[in-house]
Structure formats: structure tokens, C-alpha cells
Amino acid sequence: LAQVCVFMGVGEAEPLCVYARVRPPHEGERGDLQVRRHYGRATSIVVRNLEFALDGVFEEETGQEEFYEQAARERIEWVLAGFSATLIAYGQTGSGKTHTMCGPESVMGGLSSADLSELGVIPRACRQLFNAIFHREAHTSIVVQCGYLEVYNERC
């Protein structure tokens, strides 16, 4: 199921939310995946007659900004309100985790020359977080802590 990457967002203010983002099939790869809509929203995927219900499904044509706005922005707002939040990307090699979390190679090569529409979750979250901090009252004390862990081939 290399076409699907699963994203989980956890915050103290709201329970776990699980989203899937579907990437276009690579050349020679079977696209044996269906996205089902319920009440006009993509909320489940069907693979080999198994249906997986999720909080949302982002289809192939979903851009980076739309994904961020719907799946991640609110978690950063929770952080700014004093809650903890976690975003996890999970999936097979080649499923689109790095593309969604960081952006394409052109973004990872340097943010200053990158196409802003291609920014992934991490640079967008940093931008949202630090813009909000910059516009807070001057006497506010803020500590920012962030962790990043990539597991590859079952190794950290």
C-alpha cells in the first residue's frame, strides 16, 4: 500500500485524529485504491475489499497548503494556547511522508529559494509558530521545544 501515507495528530485539547494522504501511483504501480466519500467528504479508503474509516482522506490532487490547513494548523494553535501536540507521519518507503512533512527536494535544499506553495508541514508549522510568537506582547516569556525523529529501516 505504498500509495498511502497515514498522518496522526494528537493534542491535549482534542483526541487523536487520523488522516491518509494518497499520492499518485508511480509508473508500473497498480492504483488499486478507492477513496470513498460520505456526506461529500473523503473519509475512507478501500484496498482489496477492505475499507478503512478515517477522520479524512486527502486525494492525489491535494496541495501542501490544503493538507496543512485541514490536518495541522489547528495543532499549532493548540500549542500556542499552551497544550502539547504531536504530528506523526507513518507509511511505507515511497509513500510520501517526507514530501508531506518537509516538501519536495527543492524545499529541503533551501527555504529561501523554495516555492512557498510547496512547503511541507514542518516549515509551515515553524512559520505559523514563530509568526504568532513575534506578534505576541513583548513581556510574554515563551520557551519553544521541538523534537524530530526519523525511523528508517527500523533504526533511529
Image (cartoon, rainbow, N blue to C red):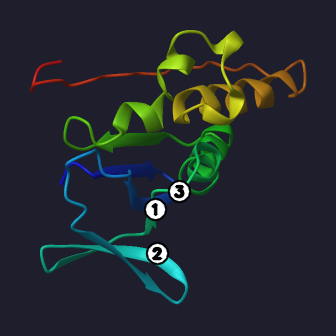
Give amino acid for label 1.
Glu
Q: Nearer the viewer, mark 2 or mark 1?
A: 1
Residue 115 in picture, x, y percent from top left: 68, 26
Res 26 → quadrant? top left
- Position above or below: 155 against 40: above
Q: Which mark is residue 42?
A: 2
Pointer 1 residue: 59
The residue under label 3 is which amino acid type? Glu
Q: Are marks 3 and 1 in contact (CB under 8 Å)?
A: yes
Label pair 2/1, CB-CB below 8 angstroms:
yes
Please tell me which residue is depicted at 67% across the width and 45% down the height of the picture.
Answer: 77
Q: Which residue is mark 3?
A: 61
Pointer 3 local density, CA inside 10 Å: few below 14, some 14–19, many at least 20: few
Tell me which residue sits at (42%, 62%) in the image. 15
- Compared across the picture, whether 18 is left or right of 40 comes to left
Dot 2, how many residues are within 10 Å of its Cα: few (below 14), some (14-19), or many (20+)? some
Which quadrant is home to the N terminus? bottom left
Tag 1's secondary structure?
loop
Q: Position of residue 33 (x, y in %)?
A: 26, 68
Residue nearer the viewer, 8 or 84: 8
Q: Quadrant of the C terminus?
A: top left
Q: Residue at x 43, y 40 (%)?
A: 86
